[in-house]
Image (cartoon, grey):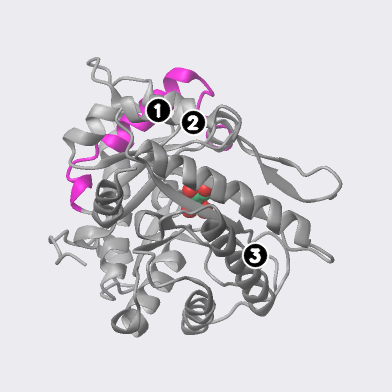
Amino acid sequence: MNSQALMDTAKALAAGGKGILAMDESNPTCNSRFRKLGIPETVEARRAYRELLLTTPCLGDCISGVILFDETIRQTRKDGTPLGEVVIDAAMIPGIKVDLGAKDLAGYPGEKITEGLDGLRGRLAEYFLLGARFAKWRAVIKIGESIPSRGCIEANAQALARYAALCQEAGLVPIVEPEVLMDGDHTMGRCGEVTEVALRTVFAELSAQRVMLEGMVLKPNMVIAGLACSAQNPVEEVASATMQCLRRTVPAAVPVIAFLSGGQLASDASAHLNAMNEGYKSQLPWALSFSFARALQQSALEIWRGYDTQVFLAQQALHHRAACNQAARRGAYTPEMEMMGVRTGKEEDQ
Ligand code: 13P
């Protein structure tokens, strides 16, 4: 295992105040987002959309790495350049989703286990040759009346840890993503309790599987009320609850925490990230960054709708969201940026 290379990659993913663009939706997820907007659910439409995202001018000023789906890393730009090369040419690091999705967990109705460990060592070796330098595995934890169960949390934590160890062996930085879902009407307090247990369990398993914490990225949910909860908390409360949870559970050796957006409005995700950096950054051992999918892409997708004539505007929308979140990393995001667009100055390394 080349520990130095792993640590360098993990650091590079947080450098320059930049964040990660997650564009690794599986085909069914991508198709369902296309369907809602009347975009054809075809290989070519998915390729064209991913080309649009990756060729956004100056994206590499705000985005350090992109997470690709297996189909995408094997596709090319219209001129024949592999999309993985397009990422590297734009000064970004290619990453790859390697889990095979969340499936029903036997014996635990309503809960999921993420699959994909079988044959993973071989797939990781191939992705490394295709240029990937980091990977992602997403575990899904649902809050309900009597869930999550201990069995679900432990099974998912163990899978995450085994995946992470295999990634490091293969020279890929693992993004470890235990996502407590926003689906449901639970309170922010309940989300905090569940997230705390989930993260404690994940770090115990990472330690048991000898994962080098300096060479990984944690991708957690923010501590936030369920989407159907009538009591939504102000931005500062979400920031403080999230910080309390992470400080209790995440070892200082982890270099980067890159949040998922989880279905929040794009502007809310930026405001929450901003509040955490503004209020707590100077006291934290880890960089607080973003690895958003919907909160970066949604406006661009809605503008594009499959039309070539809309590509430029869609790319502007993506760049704007990336720049808003880069500003949020330094606590410099303001709601006014939503109206006017923001500059993309290169920021100090962190
Ligand atoms: P969202 O930001 O849309 O939650 O997606 C992040 C992600 O990568 C899910 O695995």
Residue contact at pointers 3 and 2, CB within 8 angstroms = no
Crowd around label 2: few <14 · some 14–19 · many ≥20 (10 Å): some
The secondary structure type at the circle numbered 1 is helix
- Identify the residue position indicated by label 3 in the image: 227
Q: Position of residue 30 (x, y in %)?
A: 53, 34
**Bounds of the magenta span?**
34-61
Residue contact at pointers 1 and 2, CB within 8 angstroms = yes
Q: Position of residue 13 (x, y in %)?
A: 28, 53
- Identify the residue position indicated by label 1 in the image: 125
Identified by mark 3, the residue type is: Leu
- Identify the residue position indicated by label 2 in the image: 121
Identified by mark 2, the residue type is: Arg
Residue 148 seen anywhere in this rendered image of the structure: no
- Give the number of the disc on residue 244: none
Residue placed most toward the observer, 109 or 337: 109
The residue positioned 50% from the left and 28% from the top of the image is 39
Residue 180 in the magenta stretch? The answer is no
